[in-house]
Amino acid sequence: MAHYLLTGGTGLIGRALCQHLVDDNHHVIVLSRQPENIIKLCGDKVEAVRSLETIDQKIHFDAVINLAGAPIADKHWTKKRKKLLEQSRIAMTSKLVSWIKQRDLKPSCLISGSAVGWYGNGGEQYLTEESNFHDEYTHQLCDAWEKQALQAKEIGVRVCIVRTGLVLSAEGGFLKKMLLPFKMGLGGRLGNGQQYMSWIHIKDMVNLLTFLIANHNAKGIINACSPSPVSNKTFSQTLVKQLNRPAFLPVPAWFLKLVLAEMSQLLLHGQRALPKKAQALGFKFDYTELNIALADVLSTQ
C-alpha cells in the first residue's frame, strides 16, 4: 500500500484521482479547509486533514499531488478575485513546499498542477514543453505557481509540473457548463472559432498522473492534453453532432469582451498544445479523438 497526500481533492481531477487511488487500496490523505466535505465527496476511506502540521512525521509519502486552486473561470477577474486565484495556487504551493522541506522523510515526488494557459495565446502554433509564452495573466499566474513547486528540487525531490488542458468529464468542469445551452440548440463557436482548445479525457488525466508518479524518469514540465487539439469551431461542431442538436448562435468576440472583460481571454485565446514529453516517456492515451472522447463522457448523461 502506497501513501499519498493530495491537495485540491474536492476539484474535478482531485475527486477522480482520489477515487482511483482508494480503489487500488492506497492510503490517501487529503488536505482541506473543510475536511467534512472530503468524506462526502471522496468517501470514508480517505483521511481528511485541515492542517499539514497534523500529519504524522513517520509517514513516507510515495507522492504529494498538489492540485489546489480556486476555479479560474467562475467569476470576473477583479483585483479581489485575482488575489484569491493567486493565494490558492502560489501561496498554497509555497506553504506545501516549505512543509516538505522540514520533513525528515521527504516524499518520493511532487506532482504539481498548472495549465496550458502558461503559454498564453498561442494562435495556430504547436506548443510543446519547450515552447515560449505570450505574456498575459494566465501565463503570469501559472508561471509563479510553477516556480514555487520547482523549489522542491533543491532538496532532491523529483518534481513534475502538469500543464493541464480542458478536462472532459461528466462530473463537472467546463463541459458541464457548456451542455445546457448546446442541448437547447443555443450553442456555437466563440468569436471566430479559430482559437485552439487543448483537451484531455478525465480517465487519461488520472492515468497520466499515476503514470508520472510511478515513472522515475518523469520530471519537469509535462503537457497534460490529448495529441489532437482542435479549434473552438471544430469542438463546437463535434459537440452538437454528439448531442444531435443545431448550433446556430455564435457568440461574437466583442460581446465576450464586454461582458467578461479580461477573463474573455480564457475563451478567445487558445493553445495548440501537444503532449510531447508524456508520449516520449511511453504514456499511451486511450482517448485521442475528440468525437470518441465526447461520446464516452456524454454516455453517462
Image (cartoon, helix red, strand yellow):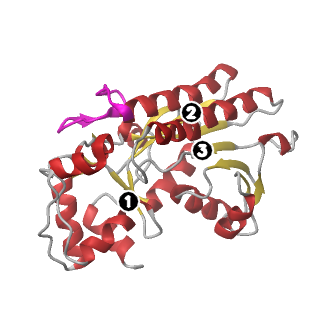
Magenta residues, start to end: 119-137
Q: What numbered label is drawn on residue 174?
A: 1
Front position in the image: 115 or 21: 115
Per the image, the residue denoted by label 3 is: 213
Above or below: residue 223 compared with residue 29: above
Q: Earlier in the sequence, mark 2 or mark 3?
A: 2
- Check disc 2 and give the amino acid type: Ile
Question: Which residue appears at 53% of the width and 49% of the height?
Answer: 209
Query: Which secondary structure is most common in the magenta stretch?
Result: loop
Q: Secondary structure at mark 1?
A: helix
Indicate left or right for 67 with 238 as reference.
Answer: right
Quarter-wise, where is residue 51 in the image?
A: top right
Question: Which residue appears at 69% of the width and 64% of the height?
Answer: 37
Q: Secondary structure at mark 3?
A: helix
Across and down, in percent, residue 24 comes to: 67, 63
Name the quadrant of the N terminus.
bottom right
Question: Which residue appears at 31% of the width and 57% of the height?
Answer: 288
Asked if residue 133 is among those painted magenta in the image, a careful observer would answer: yes
Q: Earlier in the sequence, mark 3 or mark 1?
A: 1
Q: What numbered label is drawn on residue 90?
A: 2
Across and down, in percent, residue 299 comes to: 37, 79
- Check disc 3 and give the amino acid type: Ile
In whole angstroms, how far apart are the C-alphas of marks 1 and 2? Answer: 23 Å
Circle 2 residues within 10 Å: few <14, some 14–19, many ≥20: many
Above or below: residue 227 compared with residue 201: above
Across and down, in percent, residue 221 comes to: 46, 32
Circle 2/circle 3 CB separation < 8 Å = no
Q: Secondary structure at mark 2?
A: helix
